[in-house]
Image: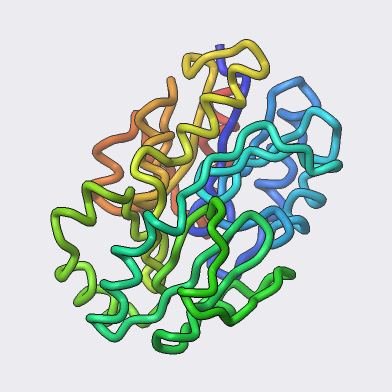
Amino acid sequence: MIKMIALDLDGTLLTTDKKISTRNERVLKNLSAQGIKIVLCTGRPINAIWKYIEQLGLTGVEDFTITFNGALVIQNPQRQILIRQGITKQQLTLLHEFGANNHLPLDVLDFQSVYPLSDLRPSIYQQMLNAKIDFIPTDFAQLKDEPYSKAVIASQPDVLNRAYKELTPAMFEHYHIVRSQPKILEFLDHDMDKAVGLRALLAHYHWTFDNLMSFGDAENDLGMLQAAQVGVVMDNGLPAIKEQGTDVTLNNDQDGVAVFLEKYFA
């Protein structure tokens, strides 16, 4: 029995203009009222998506969000942490060297702020994220020796295409690397993805992946799509991602989430 619905945001629940449609909102609120847990799963911090949490009414003490692509599971209203798993500064050394050698920008995120590395090229991540979160330019050498949620290379798609081709086997062994958006390449702890956070949250409710339905469209959704009993890929999703889901629904501008849920729970 499906008891939890996990939803990616960009390219999935959100329309191209970054809104939750009226139809998606209505269907998700109705299912929430029936006792099904609605969980937003994102690479962003909770402050950056709070308007969506409020829109869906996910503000109860038993409402949680998967943030930083699984690295932080946080209770919504009081921001209590269920799990947090980071990556160390030492682990980021290889990535910093890659950025310097290839003239790329790099933003390092802890669980509260973003640190654009000032000893590398300027980044466009701040203007892309457009969220209520502090951006603190910092030289890599000055970063504190503490856990970080992830690092991001944000640039134009052609730049990231070239950068991806330069990634070494050692980097794939060292990091979980995902192209979450055309302009964003993310580097997480090697064993980290959204499924890690969802496993912990399901255990909190004494449920398993057999009780999970997930929706996604991109590489950073792959883990939760494969793990869920029902893994639904948007029609705008990558072909390789569609092959890994159990179902495909309409695209994010055609209320694909609501259309599938209406049929499934009819």
Work out whether residue 87 or residue 44 is closer to the camera in this orientation and state it.
87
Q: Residue at x 23, y 56 (%)?
A: 171
Which color scheme does this rendered protein use? rainbow
Q: In the displayed structure, would residue 190 be above or below residue 102?
A: above
Q: Residue 82: where, in percent of width, then height?
A: 68, 32
Q: In this orientation, which residue lies closer to the viewer: 143 or 1?
A: 143
Name the quadrant containing residue 93: bottom left
Q: Residue at x 19, y 77 (%)?
A: 162
| 175 left or right of 192 in image | left
Residue 206 pos. (x, y %): 63, 11
Left or right of 30, for residue 241: left
**Residue 69 higher or lower than 47, as above or below:** above
Q: Residue at x 43, y 34 (%)?
A: 224
Quarter that holds the C terminus = top right
Please state, as top left, top right, bottom left or bottom right, where the N terminus lies in the image.
top right
Q: Toward which corner of the image does residue 104 lie, by quadrant?
A: bottom left
Q: Is residue 57 visible?
A: no
Please, is residue 155 above or below residue 171 in the view?
Answer: below
> Residue at coordinates 34% horizontally, 50% vertically from top-left?
219
Instruction: Look at the image and tell me whether residue 160 can be seen.
Output: yes
